[in-house]
Amino acid sequence: MKRYLLLILIAAMSFISCKEQVNIIRTDVPERPAGQESVLGLTTEPLETVRIGIVGLGMRGGSAVDRLSYVPDCQITALCDIEQDRVTRSAERLIAKGIADVQTYGGEAESWRGLCESPEVDLVYICTDWKNHVPIALYAMECGKHVAIEVPAATTLDEIWDLINMSEKTRRHCMMLENCVYDFFEMSTLAMAQEGVFGEVIHVEGAYHHCLDPYWDEYWESWRLEYNKEHRGDVYPTHGIGPVCQVLGIHRGDRMKTLVSMDTKPFNGPKIYELKNGVPCPEFKNADQTSTLIRTEKGKTMLIQHDVMTPRPYDRLYQVVGTDGYAGKYPIQLYCLRENASLEEGYDALGIEKIYSGEALKELQQKYPNPLMNPEFVELAQSVGGHGGMDFIMDYRLVYCLHNGLPLDMDVYDLAEWCCISDLSRLSLENGNMPVEVPDFTRGEWDVKKGFSYAFAY
């Protein structure tokens, strides 16, 4: 009888174990290599002048050349692109601004190696196609350079861990150039959330809804359309997820724990591919719409979406839902706050919520200023431009922190968390929309720091 009961117990335990394995896809967190340490709050030697080498001079890189020429305490010292004419044009624009003696590299697939090796470069600023981001960044850090990588910095978990390990090994900064965390509404809302205006934030949403019909031909050798053809999942999550991760304090008191994704069929993708290439496309992997739902360690949720195939209006979604308030950016900016009563007093006493938009919204924001939003600085950013000024603020903050030896606003773990959605959403979709475990890229240190903050040299 005892043996019979023991067999039943073993069978039950096996069933539970199998059920757990079926219900979630586990992901590995590799052991930190010997001799490496965390780069949370990493500081490095101050740089009197941050000497910048830019790799990739297309749409993003060409704009960076112009913006960085207005940022104090830095100098563009090197330019590189596989197409020599882009290098020549960018160098000529700098000469016209009185910036000479710029090293140039180009014409070959790995011309970037020379730029990374140059003793005249402190920071390698990477604006190439996605597949070249990680090889260039890894080599640059091996050469002792800090790196800033355009979005998405990495597309697979293996690439992400390679960047983390190299940053930890070399003690060099590895930052992703996520500009949307510096948009004005997002910065104001972040400051308000940190002051408790919305109560406790319990749910956030972010997206990249952007019809790319006018832009597919702008990508060198059509690499972006080809990437969408070959890859399923949210391949461009960082604009949507970056700002809301800062609001939730991801790896600064909370962490993403599990996610599940769903997508539509690729309705428009094959048609666009055939239109651009003149051949049928029976196998197109990326959906017209991909949605990913994430749950955090502390029981909060995040909704992230991707759609570059339909004619819906541009929208990064950006919504912050708290126990006592709400912020939404699209289609109009507004705040909605519980007014004049506490929840305990009952629904009838709440007086419903108060909605702030237009001038009332601006007045509310002014009560909770973001420390970066000095009016004179905002005016300068808007005059220089770059997606309305947020690109300039991103560059300014990067240079400011390197110049003063301060921690960057975004570290390599932010890069990892915001980029990992691509590979993890693919895993969920390819396995029948199963939940997937989100790795702890900090290797257990996600709760060491409490809340997001900017570093300043006072």
Image: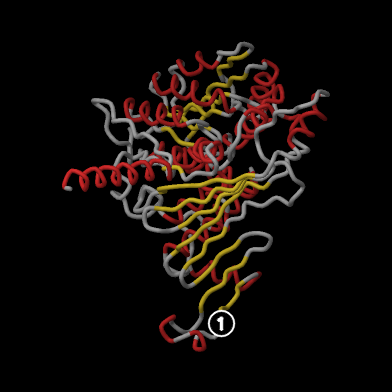
Q: In this view, does 421 lie above or below 354?
A: above
**Where residue 270 sits in the image (x, y, percent)?**
75, 33
Give the left or right position of residue 395, taking residue 162 as reference. Answer: right
Judging depth in this view, the residue of 34 and 101 nearest the camera is 34
Figure coloring = secondary structure
**Where residue 40 sits in the image (x, y, percent)?**
33, 41
Judging depth in this view, the residue of 27 and 96 nearest the camera is 27
**Where residue 267 sits in the image (x, y, percent)?**
74, 40
Q: Is residue 381 visible?
A: no
Q: In terms of secondary structure, where does tag 1 sit? A: loop
Q: In this view, does 226 lie above or below 370?
A: above
Q: In this view, does 340 lie above or below 138?
A: below
Q: What residue sits 83% from the left and 24% below the top?
A: 278
Count of marks overlaid on the render = 1
Judging depth in this view, the residue of 388 and 345 nearest the camera is 345
Q: Can residue 130 be seen in this view?
A: yes
Q: Residue furthest front?
A: 1
Q: Name the residue under label 1.
A: 352
Q: What residue sits 62% from the left and 19% below the top?
A: 81
Q: Residue furthest top?
A: 108
**Where residue 18 sits in the image (x, y, percent)?**
36, 41
Choose top left, top right, bottom left or bottom right for residue 93.
top right
Q: Is residue 320 above or below residue 68?
A: below
Choose top left, top right, bottom left or bottom right for residue 14.
top left
Q: Give the amino acid at mark 1.
A: Ile
Q: How crowded is mark 1: few (under 14 residues within 10 Å), some or many (20 or more)?
A: some
Q: What residue sits 69% from the left and 41% below the top?
A: 265
Q: Which residue lies furthest to the bottom in this view?
A: 349
